[in-house]
Amino acid sequence: MSAATPALLVLEDGRTFRGEAYGAEGETFGEAVFNTGMTGYQETLTDPSYHRQVVVMTAPHIGNTGINDEDPESRRIWVAGYVVRDPARRSSSWRATRTLDDELREQGVVGISGIDTRALTRHLRERGAMRVGISSTETDPAALLARVQQSGEMAGAELASEVSTQETYVVPAIGEKKFTVAALDLGIKSMTPHRMAERGIEVHVLPATASLEEIRAVSPDGLFYSNGPGDPAATTHQIDVLQGALAAGLPYFGICFGNQLFGRALGFGTFKLKYGHRGINQPVMDRTTGKVEVTAHNHGFAVDAPLDTETQTPYGVASVSHVCLNDDVVEGLELRDASGSLKGFSVQYHPEAAAGPHDAAYLFDRFVSLMEGTV
């Protein structure tokens, strides 16, 4: 067995970790973030919302179930780099077709293993998400640090156009078709249109650059904005389109980035969280029902909206519908007309939630009710 290749991880504040190369050898840069999920690493890796981010897994053992061809959420791995403590030496699942290490190497994803991910996570919690570099070709931390500090930052980055589809495609309804939805792909996960298709919705997935006219061309019963990477404050075109759709009375549902853009379209600001929410165990209260859900998250920005005050907007009355019970971050918005009827809503988390939990799947039913005009 050949000796492992040494690798180096350097944060932009100079904190340094030494380990072994995992996946592809080489050098990579991105924003260091941590994910607390103990399962679902394949879905994490292929989530376009992680574009330009180096993901630190807090669970110590990663790779146990290998890689299969059924669970990817998009066409490729999007993470800029991958950090694990103790990678599995072999896969152990009847569904696996190859190892995680092989997949990372095949797709050119530079990673590092064998470091103290608990210490790294604590550092990010205390100091906040920051730029990072991983290299198996550089041995001098000072030299790598200089390149980290020259790399791009997440604040101010418009990234949805880099991960979006370039061509419109259609996900047909499963069974009887009830509605048509125009879904703007800002980094959509494949499970999202599938969850709508299960409810009789034909989903037309459009590029992030789609105009309101192109949306109207599919004669939609509703408009959907997906999750995605980047700073919502750097996004303007999609906000203009959404405001036009709201003014026209088109029912709206947004997830994650779609929640942030909904907030900005309604006149609220957005801000960067210190270290974000990334995992599959975040408690959120649906204030419209009083129920608490365990939810899947992946976001570094949030909406700045008043928790207990309704806000009059040009499109109706907006209010906070969901809140995170850990830190009171806004986790959902809703918009109602003067009569109290729902016009649009959004959540900051992931109700499609592959690989779970599934507490929030009811939100797709709420979207159906919105298009039916029964809420």
Image (cartoon, helix red, strand yellow):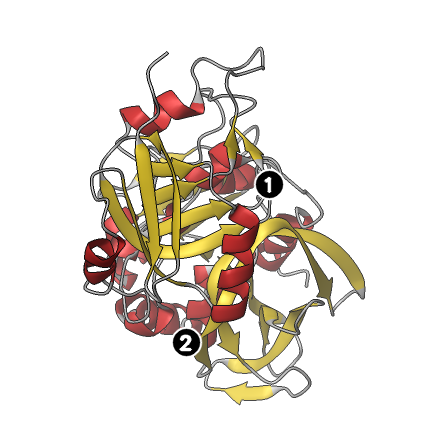
Badge 1 is on which residue?
59
Quadrant of the image for the N terminus?
top left
Labelled disc at residue 139: none
Instruction: Name the residue located 34 percent from the left edge and 29 percent from the top edge.
Output: 23
Q: Quadrant of the C terminus?
A: bottom right
| Residue type, label 2 | Ala
Query: At which x and y percent is residue 263?
Result: 47, 74
Residue at the spot 55% in from the left edge and 89% down from the top edge: 312
Residue labelled with disc 2: 265
Rendered location of residue 160, percent (x, y): 30, 56
Label 2–label 1 contact, CB within 8 A: no
The residue closer to the viewer here, 241 or 320, is: 320
Query: Which of 202/106 is in front?
Result: 106
Q: Secondary structure at mark 1?
A: loop
Q: How many marks?
A: 2
- Compared to residue 58, the image places residue 65 above or below, namely above
Any part of residue 371 in sight? yes
Residue type, numbered disc 1: Ala
What is the x, y in percent for residue 100?
43, 25
Secondary structure of the residue carrying numbered label 2: helix
Number of other residues with Cα within 10 Å of mark 1, as a class: few under 14, some 14 to 19, many 20 or more: some
Residue 251 shows in the view: no
- The mark that comes first in sequence, 2 or 1, is 1
Location of residue 18 (image quadrant): top left
Instruction: Determine whether, in the image, residue 220 is placed left or right of residue 330.
Output: left
* Residue drawn 30% across the image and 26% down it: 105
For image coordinates 26% across by 32% down, the residue present is 25
Q: Position of residue 196 (x, y in %)?
A: 54, 42
- Which circle, 2 or 1, is nearer the viewer? 1
